[in-house]
Image (tube, grey):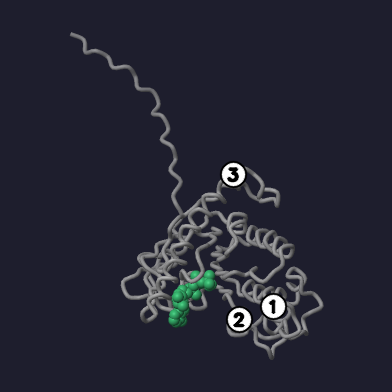
Amino acid sequence: MQAARLPHPGPAPEAPQAQPKPEPLLELRAINKTFGAVAALSGLQANIAPGEFVTVVGPSGCGKSTLFNIVAGLEEPDAGGILRFEAKSCHAADLLGRVSFMPQRDLLFPWRNVVDNAILALEVEGMPRDQARAKALKMLPEFGLAGFEKQYPNQLSGGMRQRVALMRTFLFERDLMLLDEPFGALDALTRAMMQRWLLDVWQKYRRTILFITHDVDEAIFLGDRVLVMTARPGSVKLEQVVDLPRPRRPEIVTSPEFIRLKRTLLDAIEEESMKSFQSSIAQEKSQ
Ligand SMILES: Nc1ncnc2c1ncn2[C@@H]1O[C@H](COP(=O)(O)OP(=O)(O)OP(=O)(O)O)[C@@H](O)[C@H]1O
Ligand SMILES: [Mg+2]
């Protein structure tokens, strides 16, 4: 008896090529941080991919700056959390000097002029002052500071001071940049200009950026992802992917997709801001 012939299977259909996911540049697992009786962060988890632009929003006092202080290596989280940078476990202190950080307060030295404030981190790193100054002078026009190199912080507007601090952060070239409300003190027009400028620079240099803001439009306009934090103790409540094409044009803010994202984010933020507000009232009553 002849064995039934099985039909020839033909060439195997090509398996879809799984794109290997890049190792996160930064991994945070179960991060807690307490200051005495105040729990600032609790069980915070996040992964940041290389080259990603991640924006962070959340109620005032929920722990955003605390998170940045940890990633910048200025504060250690409580024991038990896991911090990994470039796929290696580390302590927060190991990250000091490995990420560039623009703190929420501009921290300019009043006795140093614009250029010398901008080169501070380069000098600390050991770059000769003349070389660092030459580098900074070239960058001044891009930051709208041309002609102001000899001015001192008390001779600058709030927005200009912020741009000097931003320039200092850019001059300190690191793969990961932490920007804590860098455009908070700018007027709406300058702010919009700086947002577009930042996107251009980011696309050119492909740094990884973590960016705190209170402005939901800004968070969507800039970000690949928006992390919404819970009320204190802060953790990540929502990770919203922003699937809007790049380069982003200013008019994108009126597109239906942008507005849909804004609605989702505002709902999440409002829920957390209410909790934060209620707990501050409860605290006042108990005192
Ligand atoms: N060094 C510190 N010592 C004591 N408490 C601190 C310290 N740093 C932060 N906190 C507390 O931790 C909580 C979170 O503060 P944090 O500055 O991280 O909030 P935030 O989300 O950045 O707020 P905002 O949006 O107003 O800048 C607050 O209750 C704050 O008082
Ligand atoms: Mg803050």
Q: How far apart are the alpha carbons under marks 2 and 1?
A: 16 Å
- The image quarter in which residue 169 lies: bottom right
Evaluate if marks 3 and 2 touch, with contact meaning CB atoms under 8 Å apart: no
Q: Nearer the viewer, mark 2 or mark 1?
A: 1
- Estimate the spatial distance between the alpha carbons at disc 3 and disc 2, rounded to whole Å: 40 Å
The x and y percentages for residue 41 are 40, 70
Q: Nearer the viewer, mark 3 or mark 2?
A: 3
Judge whether 168 appears above or below 249 on screen: below
Type of the residue with mark 1: Arg
Question: Hey, what amino acid is under mark 2?
Answer: Ala
Q: Is residue 232 above or below residue 47?
A: below
- Quadrant housing residue 113: bottom right
To which residue does mark 1 refer?
A: 161
Q: Residue furthest top?
A: 1
Question: Is residue 252 visible to us here?
Answer: yes
Q: Return the mark for residue 257.
A: 3
Q: Which mark is residue 130?
A: none
Q: Residue furthest right?
A: 147
Point out the image quarter for the C terminus. bottom left
Q: Earlier in the sequence, mark 1 or mark 3?
A: 1
Most extreme residue toward the bottom, as rendered? Answer: 111
Amino acid type, residue under disc 3 in the picture: Glu
Q: Label 1 vs label 3: CA separation?
A: 35 Å
Residue at image position (59%, 54%) is 220
The first of marks 3 and 2 along the sequence is 2
Residue 1 place in picture, x, y as percent: 17, 8
Left or right of 7? Residue 127 is right
Counting from the top left corner in percent of width and height, residue 179 is at: 58, 69
- Which residue does the image show at 68% across and 59% down from the upper left? 200
Percent position (x, y) of residue 223? 57, 56
Please give the label number shown on residue 121: 2
Specify whether residue 95 is in view: no
